[in-house]
Image (cartoon, rainbow, N blue to C red):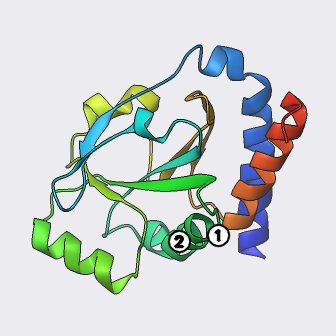
Amino acid sequence: MKKSLTSARWFFLSLCLAFASSVFSAGPVDFTLPDLEGKSHRLSDYRGQWVLVNYWATWCPPCREELPELEIFHSNSEGRAVVLGVNVEAIKHAELAAFVETQFLSYPVLVAGPRPSPQQRLGKLTGLPTSFLISPEGRLVAREVGPVTARAIRQFIESYEKSKGAG
């Protein structure tokens, strides 16, 4: 029941935001952050794909509950979409890497630290987890504070593409 409400809330909120997308994101957004291996990832490197940018922390129970859903979405997207997990806590690198390994996450986990101000170009973080959905054109089209599901993300993308006349 809880997951259904979360999915419905994400879907409803995202649809409302999608209709306001021209105001919500006037142009492409971008940021650069390192992953756990030190490789820099620019949001613009993923143009042409849907990108779910998920701000999270290991100490956050809703964040941990959401990780399997994000992995399912990422794994089943077949190059059409990607998840970028942005860790926003003061944690030792080795501890974060070990946590990510125990969760079997295949998507890039980026390290922002406890004060991710340059990355907040997507919007203010009022709670964790917070997810931002970026269109293939690089525009911010939705934001959700709280856990999301793979199904709700897919449904939003399908509805958004239909509303825009895309495939």
Tell me residue 129's x, y (percent).
Answer: 47, 56
- 7 shown above or below 136: below
Q: Residue at x 89, y 31 (%)?
A: 165
The residue wearing badge 2 is 71
Residues 70 and 15: in front is: 70
Answer with left or right where residue 164 lies relative to residue 133. right
Residue 129 visible in the snapshot: no
Pick the front one: 167 or 98: 167
Residue ID at (49%, 71%): 67
Callout 2 environment at 10 Å: few (<14), some (14 to 19), or many (20+)?
many
Across the whole image, how many numbered discs are drawn on residues? 2
The amino acid on which the numbered mark 2 sits, given as a three-letter code, is: Glu
- Residue positioned 89% across, 38% down in the render: 162
Which is nearer the eye, 150 or 126?
150
144 horizontally vs 37: left or right: right
Task: Check disc 1 and report the residue beneath it.
Answer: 76
Residue 87 visible? The answer is yes
Q: Give the percent coordinates (x, y) of residue 14.
A: 73, 41
